[in-house]
Image (cartoon, rainbow, N blue to C red):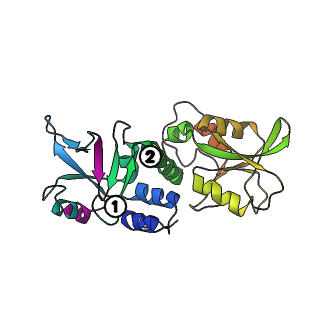
Amino acid sequence: MSLPDARTAVCEHLAGRLSSATLFRSLMAHPDWHVPVYASSEGEAAVMTFVDAAGARWVKVFTDLAAVEAWAEQGGGVPGQQCVVTDGANLFGALEDTLAGVEINPGLPEGVHYQQQHLPLLRQWARIVELESALETIDTGETPIGLLRDYDAYVIVLKRTGPDTAQLVLAPDADGRLLAAVFTAEDTLAAFFDQVLATADFEPIPVRVNGRQLFGQLQALNLDGLVFNCSGPIPPRAFGRRLADYVLTPDNGPARQSQPGDH
């Protein structure tokens, strides 16, 4: 999935041409957010907060150095403002509810802000992108398996088969394999509904599950494996059922290529 850079994404979203989900993905994927800092009493860099007229504290962040300089020229900061540079998942995943919110590129046309009630959503998108990145690195042996086990917002889809019974909806597979369809975010679930379930003769039931529930079900059911985000918009990732055994084994560290099973 090709994402616009963060500054472009904000502009496109404000113009109504970019979905909220794609905007959040662009914000989290942005590799070099500039965050103003000051030297603490211990001599360490501490993130600056800015107090508004009501006494509430905000954090200001910038997509690039040019945005920082433009803000300083408008009187918001000082020339040569010291900043730390970090990626979006780290930045937005660390926002605390004690803040009134976060301002992105304040004072610029592509500026936007999120208030306190939106901070949990930003943190959730940071976790989504972190998880999806972990799925991409399983082959390299760098994935912290605990991320897969501890994630608590997977979504599966059920088909009701009786008053008190339902069965798992599977991902399409050209080879006829029985693969659970698993989704990590709202846009990947929506793509499955649009592409696969639009003509279904039943009412699909999305169910949120945590990692232990998901991989426990994979162990219990007679399936060949699972596919994360089988309908896009990000690249799907398929794994054999042995991944469940590995994820649920206590004290497993980063995944090694020989461990998760066929994928």
Is 201 on the left or on the right of 224, as rendered? right
Q: Which class describes the residues within 10 Å of circle 1: few (<14), some (14-19), or many (20+)?
A: some
Determine the image quadrant of residue 149: top right
Q: Is residue 191 above or below residue 142?
A: below
Q: Amino acid at mark 2?
A: His
Q: Which residue is the site of mark 1?
A: 111
Numbered tag placed on residue 118 in the rendering: 2
In terms of sequence position, does the residue under pointer 2 or pointer 1 come before the other? 1
Q: Which class describes the residues within 10 Å of circle 2: few (<14), some (14-19), or many (20+)?
A: some
Q: CA distance from mark 2 to mark 1?
A: 16 Å
- Observer-nearest of 35 and 167: 35
Q: Is residue 170 above or below residue 1?
A: above
Q: Are marks 2 and 1 in contact (CB under 8 Å)?
A: no
Find residue 263 and report its horizontal and vertical position in percent: 63, 53
Which stretch did the figure color magenta? 56-69
Q: Is residue 106 above or below residue 121?
A: below
Q: Is residue 93 above or below residue 188?
A: above
- Observer-nearest of 236 and 247: 236
Find residue 161 and report its horizontal and vertical position in percent: 85, 43
Q: Amino acid at mark 1?
A: Gly
Residue shown at 40% from the left, 42% from the top? 116
Q: Furthest-right residue in view?
A: 162
Is 100 on the left or on the right of 2, as rendered? left
Residue shown at 80% from the left, 41% from the top? 166
Asked whether residue 162 is in view, the answer is yes
Find residue 256 and report its horizontal and vertical position in percent: 52, 45
Q: Furthest-front residue in view?
A: 53
Asked whether residue 230 is in view, the answer is no
Find residue 24 and report its horizontal and vertical position in percent: 46, 56
How many numbered marks have been drawn onto this rendered protein structure?
Answer: 2
Secondary structure of residue under mark 2: helix
Residue shown at 60% from the left, 45% from the top? 260
